[in-house]
Image: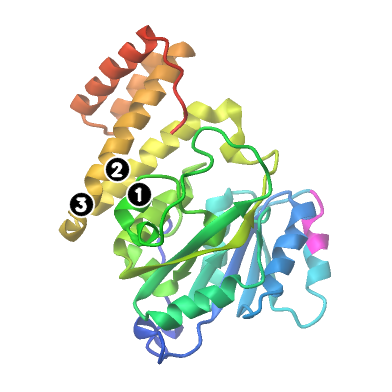
Amino acid sequence: MMERWRSGPHDQEGGEENQGASGSAPRFSVVIPTYNRAGHLAKAVQSALDQTYPPHKVIVVDDGSTDGTTSAVAGLRNGAAPVRYLRQANQGVAAARNRGILAADGDWIALLDSDDIWLPHKLETARRLIESDGRIDFIHSHPVYDFRFVTGNLLEPELTVAQSQDPAVLMDGWYIKTSSVVIRRSLLDRLGGLFSTDLRTCEDFELFWRAIAAARSIGYSIEPDVVIGSTPASLSRDAARVLDRIKDNIEAMSRVLRWLDGRPEQARLQPVLIRRRYWAARVLLTRAAREGCVVEALAWLLRHGLPRIEIGRAVVSAGRGLVNGENPSEV
């Protein structure tokens, strides 16, 4: 389910849509969702507070932690630091991000996961990009990693600046890292909804793909300004949920394709996701066959609205891969 949201009156003050070199200074509300990561959270929040261009506010959304997260945040709230702590029953990271966005009053939303950290110039770089181009609605940057775990599609090939500003290129891979993203509030308003709360994974890409399609201009910093952490609880590394992740990927692509249907000016983006969805269906069927649940996988694809001809092609191709001993990678 994609949560609906519309911006409030404060979003129109100061001519936000044309904010740039002649506009007012951007106000970044940092949204940090967290769940049982008290040991990592303090570093993430401190990295947001230590920016050379200070955030307007830092909003921590505790998604029902049971590990002392409340105490960890309380220590960071002593003093004049603009940290707001919100706690809710466990609902998932999408719901936590959505609540933080709803509570934010800046004209830009900066996303930071609680196991990642920003380098000190993150928001300063974003400010400079905004001031250089008043049409920028979406910003992301080149990340660095604090681990050496490289497998499958975990680390994507390097892109040029021009490629990183092209929605068609960005939709063709997992290039956008959540903790590097800064989004104009009014762009979220134009999207008509926030993060989908019924997707366990890929909810970030589902929103990001809509955002880059709707953005008037995309900003990108090739200079690293975010460090991506590695935690054992990371959903993207859970080997037991491979089939569920692939299903989430397929569903996210299908939702964006339906969203693009009413936007003929973005027609060039649809073939990118159609091609990726076909390959994801092929991988799903191949892995399901190896795990003895191919009938269930086929039924799932049919229930989720994939065209029968697309499913048929995926079945034939997956069958050939099995005969040839193929070991499919994740999508």
Q: Is residue 285 above or below residue 189?
A: above
Q: Earlier in the sequence, mark 3 or mark 1?
A: 1
Residue assigned mark 1: 171
What's the residue at 45%, 67% (across, down)? 139
Q: Indicate the quadrant where residue 273 lies.
A: top left
In the rendered view, tell whether residue 7 sits above or below residue 18: above
Question: Pointer 3: what residue?
Answer: 268
**Residue kind at label 3, given as amino acid type:** Arg
Residue beneath disc 2:
273
Q: Secondary structure at mark 2?
A: helix
Neighbours of disc 2 within 10 Å: few (<14), some (14-19), many (20+): many
Circle 1: residue type: Met
Across and down, in percent, residue 3 comes to: 43, 57
Most foreground residue, 142 or 188: 142
Q: Distance of mark 3 from mark 2, alpha carbons? A: 10 Å
**Residue at 64% in and 37% down:** 149
- Name the spot of residue 6 as percent of width and height, x first: 39, 70
Assess whether residue 86 is covered by the magenta stretch. no
If you read the primary sequence from the N terminus, does the residue marked by circle 3 or circle 2 appear first?
3
Question: What is the spatial separation of the Cα atoms under label 1 and label 2, in whole angstroms?
Answer: 7 Å
Disc 1 residue crowd, few under 14, some 14–19, many 20+, Cα 10 Å = many
